[in-house]
Image: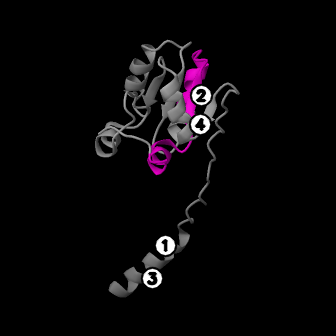
Amino acid sequence: MIRLAFPALLLLSACTPPPPPEVLIEPPPIILPDSVKQLTAEQAAALIQSTPDLTILDLREDWEIKNQGRIAGSVWADFLNDQRFTEATAKLDPTKPCLLYCAIGGRSKLAAEKLAGKGFTHLSLLAGGWEEWLRAGKPMQK
């Protein structure tokens, strides 16, 4: 009986089609308006110092801020939580300057694309995000 079961299993497994090949789908490119500026940590720090009505949006998740700190005076607008992001940005004046940052820069580009589509006209991004801010030795708040 066992001798018959094993060949039957082999025969059945040989009839199973191979899994489909992995298909890698590239995300659509992020197209930022020319008005969106990408700033180094030095340029972002200078913007913070020279622009009293600047809003700084921290787009990271809550645990990232709790574990790593943040730029002083930043407003939390978790980009991965659509409700939180919408609530935080709905309170902002789209004609006032805004600096966006996340961990390494990806979420801030997506957020800038979204905000520009909602009429925000003075957007800047911290290129390299929080990681670049720390690498440059800029001040942080825990």
Query: Which secondary structure lies at badge 4?
Result: strand
Task: Tell me which amino acid carries mark 1.
Answer: Ser
Residue 70: image location, x then y, percent = 37, 37
**How far apart are the alpha carbons under marks 3 and 2?**
59 Å
Q: Quick check: 2 above or below 79?
A: below
Task: Tell me which amino acid carries mark 4.
Answer: Leu
Residue 66: image location, x then y, percent = 28, 40
Q: Mark 2 points at which residue?
A: 113
Q: Quadrant of the rendered structure where residue 76 is?
A: top left
In the displayed orientation, state which residue is furthest to the bottom: 3
Say few, some or many: other residues with alpha carbon within 10 Å of mark 4 (under 14 / 14 to 19 / 20 or more).
some
Say few, some or many: other residues with alpha carbon within 10 Å of mark 1 (under 14 / 14 to 19 / 20 or more).
few
Q: What stretch is highlighted in magenta?
A: 110-137
Of callouts 1 and 3, which one flags the residue occurring earlier in the amino acid sequence? Answer: 3
- The residue at the point 39 percent across, 40 percent down is 139
Of callouts 3 and 4, which one flags the residue occurring earlier in the amino acid sequence? Answer: 3
